[in-house]
Amino acid sequence: MKCAAIDFGTNTARLLIGERINRKLSTLRVEREIVRLGGGFSDDMGLSEEAQKRGLNCLKKFAGIIREYGVEQIRASATSAVRDAVNGATFVEHVFRETGIRLNVIGGDLEGRLTLEGVISGLDVIHEKMVVLDVGGGSTELTVAENGIPQFVRSIPLGVVRLTEGFTTFQSMNQRIVTVLNQLETEMSAAGICGQPGSELVATAGTATTLAAIQMEMTDYDYRRVNNFLISRAEIEAIYQRLLPLSPSERISIPGLEKGREDLIMAGILITGHVMDRFGFGRLKVSDYGLLEGLAISDVELV
């Protein structure tokens, strides 16, 4: 069956078209665009008009590509920005009228589970114990799994767009991250999840893939080299210190740093570093696979 999956995130929109046979996927085409749907977000107004225009224009392009391939099934998800917005439902209906794409607004728990499924599909080794970290634009999902089965899933209110736009200093960002992780650790302890000795940390989404690309000084992004790349906590800290004195416009010249992430990457590194330090991870494995692939291969209903 020819299928399409859309991961419509707070910062990035991604489209995958593939042939699916018995939960195995043969990829035909992948498209992505930094839309920054969460840009200018407010609790009172929700998604800004400009962000909605960017999002709609992107989805119109995706709809045209989907028609070209004669897709039989579309599985499209919207995550943190849309689910938290007071005008999220209105935006979803507008998108459907204009493009024919039905965005399913999924909760953080389902997002984490689908991301785990997608990540596993691209791993070189299926680790017995694994923690999957998905640092997004509006939220971060942390999933603890054993033998591929989720044991604990949480979506926490830390995202690179919201941190970058909501806090003016790195010190205030750090304070916010510590507060949220304190609450997360309390919830993990209450659930009997105490520490993760022997677990592999696997990080997906833009922060992790950007760190890998910068570490490899990658001028042309190659997902095959990025996927399953190992990077140490010390190497991540070195990248942070290298970027810290630079302005966002100056960071664009760094090989591996994609335009559109130059202001967001610092918040992403801070979240990643705090998680590694809090739970004792000296390295992480980068996954280029995630929610998008999980949407494509899973049979779970998007409710």
Image (cartoon, grey):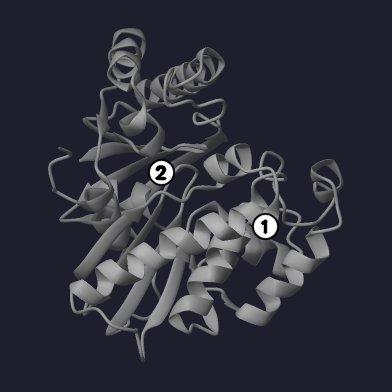
Is 94 drawn above or below residue 21 in the view shown?
above
**Percent of width and height locating residue 164:** 62, 43
- Residue 119 appears anywhere in the view: no
Instruction: Check the picture and name the quadrant holding the N terminus.
Output: top left
Is 166 drawn above or below residue 190 in the view shown?
above
- Residue situated furthest bottom in the rendering: 198
Of 185 and 247, which appears nearest the observer? 185
The residue under the point 32% across, 53% down is 155
| SS assignment at label 2 | strand
**Percent of width and height locating residue 91:** 35, 16
Of 202 and 266, which appears nearest the observer? 266
Q: Tell me if mark 1 has few (under 14), some (14-19) or many (20+) residues whose alpha carbon lies within 10 angstroms of its own.
A: few
Separation of disc 2 and disc 1 at Cα? Answer: 44 Å
The residue under the point 61% across, 37% down is 165
Q: Amino acid at mark 2?
A: Leu
Task: Please give the residue where the numbered disc 2 appears in the rendered image.
Answer: 28
Q: Amino acid at mark 1?
A: Gln
92 vs 68, left or right, is left
Instruction: Check the picture and name the quadrant holding the C terminus.
Output: top left
Q: Which mark is residue 171?
A: 1
The residue under the point 34% across, 84% down is 195
**Percent of width and height locating residue 237:** 70, 73
22 vs 272, left or right, is left
The label nearer to you, 2 versus 1, is 1
